[in-house]
Every structure is written in C-alpha cells, then in structure tokens.
Image (spheres, rainbow, N blue to C red):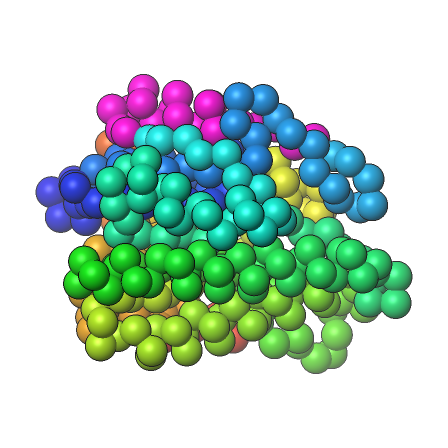
Amino acid sequence: MSNAPRLDGKVALVTGSSRGIGRAIAQRLASAGATVVVTARSVEKEVAGKRFQQDQVVSGTLAETISLIEKAGGKAIPLGADLEKAEERDSLVERAIDAAGGLDILVNNAGFADYARVDQMTVDTFERTFGHYLRAPFMLAKAAIPHMKTKGAGWIVNIGSVTSMPVRRPFLEYQRRGGDVVYASMKAALNRFSQGLAAELVDSNIAVNLVGPSTAIRTPGASDLIPAGYKTEDVEYLAECVLHMSYLPAVERTGFLAFSMHFPWAHNIQVMSLDGRTPMPKREPPEFSHPAIPAAGI
C-alpha cells in the first residue's frame, strides 16, 4: 500500500529469526525494503536447545527464513549466533554491520520460555531467562548505539509480553498454578528498560520501543505453553507494529509499549500480510485481553 512505511536502504538485525515471531518480523521488514540480517542458532539445520531441563529441538532454520524472504522479493543475510555464548553475542552487531554494510534497526526478539514455579526453578534456568531477556538486549543495544549515533538515527525494538502486565486479583487459576513468574518479571523489566533507554537516546534521534502480543501467538517455541483451547492471534499484527516502530524520527515515536492488537486498532493502522501485499482484517482487541494494556502504546 502506498501509505505503508518503507525501509528502502535500511539494514535491520532481527534476533531469533529462524522461526515464529522473529521470522515474521524479518519477513515484514524485508517486504518494506529493508535488508534484514537474520540470526539464530539454527542456520542450515535445527540445533537442540536446553528447555525443561532437557535437550529440545524446535523446528525452523535461518535457511527457511531466507528462502521465504527471497521468494517474496526481499533481501536477507544469515548470521549464526548463540546469545548464551558471550563471544557470539557480543560480536553480533559488528558482524552484522560487516555483512550488511551498516545497521539502522535492531530487533531484540530471541528468547526462550522455560516455565517453572519459583521454588522448583533451577538457578541455571533463572540465569538463562535473565540472559535472554535483559542481558542480551542490553549488550546488543550497547553495541548498536554508537553506530546509530554516528548515522544520526536508529531504531531499537524490544519484544515484550502481556505477562509483564500486573497480576490481577483475585488471582487467576493459571497464576495460582504458577510457572511464569521469572519470565514475566524479566519482561516487565524489559518494559522499563525500553522506556528508560528511549529517554536517554531521544536527543540522539534513536527511537526505542517495545512491542508485544496482546494475547498469545502460537509459534513452534511457545505452543507447548499455550492451552489447546486458548484463543490466539495472528503474528501479522505484531510484525506490523514492529514495522511502524522502525521508521519515524525518535521525537515522534519513542518510549511506547505497543501491543499487537491494541496499537493498530488505536492508531488506525492497516495491517498487511508478511509479504506486504495483502491487507489483513481490522480486528478490535479481544475483550479478554489484559485491562492494563496501554491501548495507544503510551
């Protein structure tokens, strides 16, 4: 569509883009003209990761993501990286810049959800959750900011979660069962990190925003944690939100906590398919979504 944002000439780095939400974001940014550096552990074939205290293989590779983007006419560059390995994480931004010739947009999406009640969670799981959702966004942003300052503009988008919203009373049954306390706490901290970093960088014309699902998105990595009968949403709405956080000057749009169904509805944004060619239906946020979600993103 003619009024949709364009990212021609821009370079985006999207972590965790071998599947699910990260793949969808990479596809949408590429369809808007960006060269997308896609990164994950699984490059040509799936690599097992630790989850629920055992090795688990989840479907999806960077090669598949690249194929989808190129078939739609976009451009993407694969970079293998394990964000739990400091040397791979801390060199990722420089490697992306070397591969693509620059960096304009950083999307911190990669992560894992290893749910357990606090009294049953291992310290290793706690440390890995902290590493994915706070340490990695911090380290990647820290590496990207000097390059964005040199260019005079930049966009950082962190991927959040509706679990970061306050716990409701009386306690819901799933919260009494527990399991998401540490994950949700890290995502709540990511909200504050995003808004605080936005304030620090607005004078450098670097926008920092957070985008999360309004409800839940059934991806290969999250499916095991979503009850079979739970109503989920299409990933296109979240991907469109990320696109709309990746082009305006910081003074116009920074420090937002935007949720996938709420933000397009509040701002009358036409959501498009991941290849940018087909309009998606306008959908009002569901009544069962968390009442504390900031509808307009502020």
| 222 relative to 107 in the view: left or right | right
Residue at position x 83%, y 45% from top?
A: 53
Q: Quadrant of residue 223?
A: top right
Magenta stretch? 57-75
Look at the image and tell me whether residue 278 can be seen.
no
Residue at position x 66%, y 75% from top?
A: 167
Is residue 70 found inside the magenta-colored segment of the image? yes
Residue at position x 88%, y 61% from top?
A: 120
**Looking at this view, is 178 or 128 the one in front?**
128
Residue at position x 41%, y 31% from top?
A: 78
Which percent across, then down, holds residue 132? 59, 55
Number of callouts:
0
Quarter of the figure with the C terminus = bottom left
Q: Quadrant of residue 70?
A: top left
Task: Give the residue at the far left of this rendering.
Answer: 2
Look at the image and tell me whether residue 204 can be seen.
yes
Is residue 276 found inside the magenta-colored segment of the image? no
| 106 relative to 246 in the view: left or right | right
| 94 relative to 43 in the view: left or right | left
In the displayed structure, 28 sits above or below 60; it is below
Which percent across, then down, holds residue 283? 38, 51
In the displayed structure, 167 sits above or below 80; it is below
Which percent across, then down, holds residue 146? 30, 62
Quarter of the figure with the N terminus = top left
Which percent across, then down, holds residue 138? 49, 64
**Looking at this view, is 263 or 109 the one in front?**
109
